[in-house]
């Protein structure tokens, strides 16, 4: 069973920041724009660095085009 994290994303923000909102929830700010998946790639990289995983182990399983997302850690 994969580990799931809930994210609230703010694309095109002034800074790159990740803030815990609970054990499995985060609020993420990224400078990247939401066009062509740039913000999604940026938030996966930020979350992976924070959790100590490789970014390629993270997948958005719900909300790829929405500010509220669910991300799974693969291979756990």
Image (cartoon, helix red, strand yellow):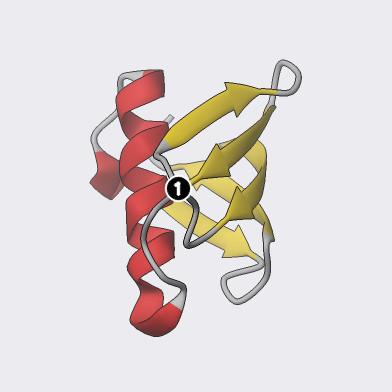
Using the rendered image of the protein, determine whether residue 56 is visible from the camera's viewpoint: yes
Q: Is residue 6 left or right of residue 11?
A: right
In the rendered image, residue 48, in percent from the top left (x then y), is placed at: 35, 33
Q: Is residue 33 left or right of residue 29?
A: left
Query: Measured along the vertical axis of the image, is residue 50 above or below residue 55?
Result: above
In the rendered image, residue 15, in percent from the top left (x then y), is placed at: 41, 41
> Which residue is pictured at 71% across the width and 16% down the height?
23
Point out the image quarter for the N terminus. top right
Q: Nearer the viewer, residue 30 or 8?
A: 30
Query: Measured along the vertical axis of the image, is residue 63 above or below residue 25?
Result: below
In the rendered image, residue 39, in percent from the top left (x then y), is placed at: 41, 63
Query: Measured along the vertical axis of the image, is residue 52 above or below residue 30?
Result: above
Q: Dot 1 corresponds to which residue?
A: 14
In the rendered image, residue 16, in percent from the top left (x then y), is placed at: 40, 39
Secondary structure, mark 1, is: loop
Using the rendered image of the protein, determine whether residue 1 is visible from the camera's viewpoint: no
Badge 1 density bin: few <14, some 14–19, many ≥20, Cα 10 Å: few
> Which residue is pictured at 25% across the width and 48% down the height?
56
> Which residue is pictured at 45% across the width and 48% down the height?
14
């Amino acid at each position: 069973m994969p580990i799931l994290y809930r994210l609230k994303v703010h694309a095109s923000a002034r800074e790159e920041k990740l803030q815990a909102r609970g054990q499995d929830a985060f609020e993420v700010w990224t400078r990247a724009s939401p066009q062509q998946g740039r913000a999604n790639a940026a938030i996966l990289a930020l979350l992976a660095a924070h959790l100590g995983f490789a970014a390629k182990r993270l997948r958005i399983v719900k909300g790829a085009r929405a500010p509220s997302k669910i991300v799974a850690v693969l291979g756990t």
